[in-house]
């Protein structure tokens, strides 16, 4: 890992810029606490739902509700 970072010293900065904001937002929406479910399959489902809500919120903010509904109806 250190070798990869030495070859690309900006990798961690890029990761923070791209990845940390969505996960921080998801954590904030979940109340910055632990998962409510137990066992890996249930936690994976809970995380998938959290990511889905994040992505839907992003789509709504970018294209708007009316455009999203129109695209869903034509799909």
Image: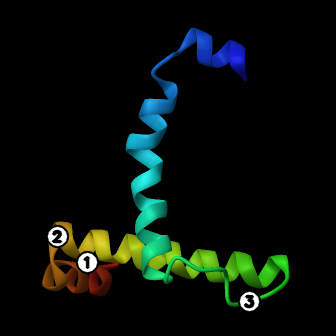
- Distance from Cα at disc 2 to Cα at disc 3: 33 Å
Report the residue marked by disc 3.
Answer: 37
Quarter placement of the C terminus:
bottom left
Q: Residues within 10 Å of mark 2 (few under 14, many from 20)?
A: few
Report the residue marked by disc 2.
Answer: 63
Residue drawn at x 66%, y 80% as measured from the top left: 34
Report the label total: 3
Report the residue marked by disc 1.
Answer: 71
| Residue 29: image location, x then y, percent | 43, 80
Label 1: element kind: helix
| Residue 17: image location, x then y, percent | 38, 42
| Residue 26: image location, x then y, percent | 46, 72
Residue 44's quadrant in the figure?
Answer: bottom right
Label 2: element kind: helix
User: Is disc 2 in contact with disc 1, using a CB cutoff of under 8 Å?
Assistant: yes
Q: Nearer the viewer, residue 75 or 2?
A: 2
Q: Earlier in the sequence, mark 3 or mark 1?
A: 3
Q: Is residue 40 left or right of residue 26?
A: right
User: Is disc 3 in contact with disc 1, using a CB cutoff of under 8 Å?
Assistant: no
Residue 59's quadrant in the figure?
Answer: bottom left
Q: Is residue 27 left or right of residue 54?
A: right
Q: Which mark is residue 26?
A: none
Which residue is most to the right? 39
Q: Nearer the viewer, mark 2 or mark 3?
A: 3
Q: Is residue 19 left or right of residue 45?
A: left
Residue drawn at x 29%, y 87% as measured from the top left: 73
Q: Residues within 10 Å of mark 3 (few under 14, many from 20)?
A: few
Q: Residues within 10 Å of mark 1 (few under 14, many from 20)?
A: few
Q: Nearer the viewer, residue 27 or 60?
A: 27
Q: Is residue 46 above or below residue 25?
A: below
């Amino acid at each position: 890992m250190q070798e990869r970072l030495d070859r690309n010293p900006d990798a961690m900065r890029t990761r923070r810029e791209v990845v940390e904001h969505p996960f921080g937002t998801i954590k904030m929406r979940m109340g910055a606490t632990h998962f409510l479910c137990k066992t890996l399959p249930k936690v994976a489902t809970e995380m998938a739902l959290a990511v889905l809500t994040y992505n839907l919120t992003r789509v709504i903010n970018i294209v708007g509700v009316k455009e999203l509904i129109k695209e869903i109806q034509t799909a």
